[in-house]
Image (cartoon, rainbow, N blue to C red):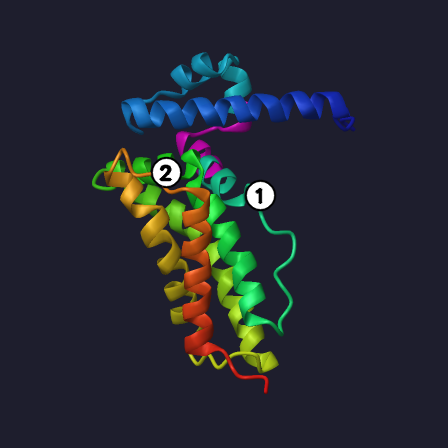
Amino acid sequence: MTPAPSAYHQRVAEEKRALIVQAATELFLELGYDRASLARVAADAGVSKATLFKQFPTKAALFDAIVIDSWARNEIADVPPAGDLAAGLTVLGRHYATLLRRPEMTDLFRIVIAELPRFPELARAHFSQGKLPYFESVRLYLVTEHEAGAADIADPELAATQFLGMISNYLLWPSLVLPDWTVTPDRTTAVVDEAVRTMVARYGRSTS
């Protein structure tokens, strides 16, 4: 029976994994997904090819890791409890804004868009393993608010799309085409707060 890895070896493996993912992200941006070889990724990450292939046997597996890491970082431990639509949406909206403003997220979208004509599977992986699970958590939260009587939401899927769209349309999409696009922390807060107010005005139920 193979002994379980020690805490030290686990930490080393995690550190090497992070180096590999970072090197891959930078190379995919610089050279494109097709031209960036796994051997070059290993060299830039400062690890052996054997170490890289042990964790990521294919380039697709490595891209999946970039997607999952980008969307899962700083993941909310618990979905806000139902009963206060404004408070719950504020938590979800601020977390989403923080996620979108990270440079790694912008890099990920640029990779997907640049490679879409030749590698549509990258976009599918990005959607199914990144955006979709996050979107689903927001949709389920809206369902719980509807069932709790705090909101009147006949179409939670559409409502979740509206909420996330109000935030991403200001914080993310301009940054993909405008290199000098910057959003201050105060402006980010205002964007989220306005999205919350719009959702509450449209879907909230009066408690009086």
Q: Which residue is mark 1?
A: 74
x 30%, y 37%: residue: 110
Q: Secondary structure at mark 2?
A: helix
What secondary structure predominates along the stretch shown in magenta?
helix
Q: Is residue 129 visible?
A: no
Q: Residue at the location (53% across, 60% down)?
A: 90
Q: In percent of the image, x 59 and y 84: which residue is there?
A: 207
Could you tell me the amino acid type at mark 2? Thr
How packed mark 1 is, by other alpha carbons closer than 10 Å (few <14, some 14-19, many 20 or more), is few
* Residue denoted by label 2: 106
Whether residue 142 appears in magenta in the rendering, the answer is no
Instruction: Return the residue nearer the eye: 77 or 118.
Output: 77
Magenta extent: 54-65
- Near-viewer residue (119 or 20): 20
Tell me where residue 176 appears, x and y as whole percent. Answer: 28, 40
Point out residue 15 in the picture as x, y percentages from the top left corner: 60, 23
